Image: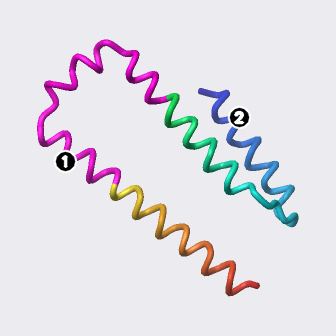
C-alpha cells in the first residue's frame, strides 16, 4: 500500500516540477495507460474463480448500484474536467 502512495506522491511531485512545461501528447499516454490497467483488472477478475462463479447470484439491485455508480463517477469526472479547464481558460 505504501508503494502505491509513494508512486502517487512521486508522480505528483514530478508533475509539480514540470507544470510550466508544455507536455504534448501526455493526455493520450494517460488514456492508453488507463485502458491497459482496466484490461489487466478485467483479466484479474476473470481469473478469480469465486468472482466468476458468483456472477450468476448477483441480483438486479447490485447491477443497478454498479451502473449508477459508474454513471455517477463519469459525470463527476466530466464536471471536474470542465471546471478545471474553465479555470485554465480564464487564467490564460
Say the numbered circle drawn on residue 64: 1
Front in this rendered view, residue 14 or 35: 35
Task: Answer left or right for 56 relative to 68.
Answer: left
Q: Quadrant of the N terminus?
A: top right
- Give the Cα separation between the discs numbered 2 and 1: 35 Å
Looking at the rendering, which quadrant does residue 90 occupy?
bottom right
Q: Secondary structure at mark 2?
A: helix
Q: Quarter of the image containing the C terminus?
A: bottom right
Residue at x-position 47% and y-position 66%: 78
Image spot of residue 88 (x, y percent): 69, 78
Sequence order check: which comes first, mark 2 or mark 1? 2
Is 9 displayed left or right of 40 in the figure?
right
Q: Which residues are magenta?
A: 41-70
In this figure, which residue is indicated by the disc labeled 2?
A: 6
Which residue is rendered at x = 54% and y = 74% of the image? 82
| Dominant SS type (magenta) | helix
* Image point (43%, 29%), residue name: 42
* Among the 4 quarters of the image, the one containing residue 55: top left
Q: Answer yes or no: do the residues labelled 2 and 1 have beta carbons within 8 Å?
A: no
Quarter where residue 71 is shown: bottom left
Q: Is residue 55 left or right of residue 76?
A: left
Q: Is residue 17 above or below residue 66?
A: below
Amino acid at each position: 500500500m505504501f508503494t502505491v502512495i509513494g508512486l502517487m506522491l512521486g508522480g505528483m511531485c514530478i508533475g509539480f516540477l514540470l507544470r510550466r512545461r508544455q507536455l504534448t501528447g501526455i493526455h493520450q499516454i494517460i488514456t492508453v495507460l488507463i485502458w491497459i490497467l482496466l484490461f489487466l483488472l478485467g483479466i484479474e477478475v476473470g481469473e478469480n474463480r469465486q468472482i466468476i462463479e458468483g456472477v450468476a447470484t448477483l441480483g438486479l439491485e447490485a447491477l443497478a448500484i454498479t451502473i449508477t455508480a459508474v454513471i455517477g463517477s463519469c459525470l463527476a469526472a466530466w464536471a471536474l474536467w470542465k471546471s478545471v479547464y474553465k479555470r485554465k481558460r480564464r487564467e490564460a
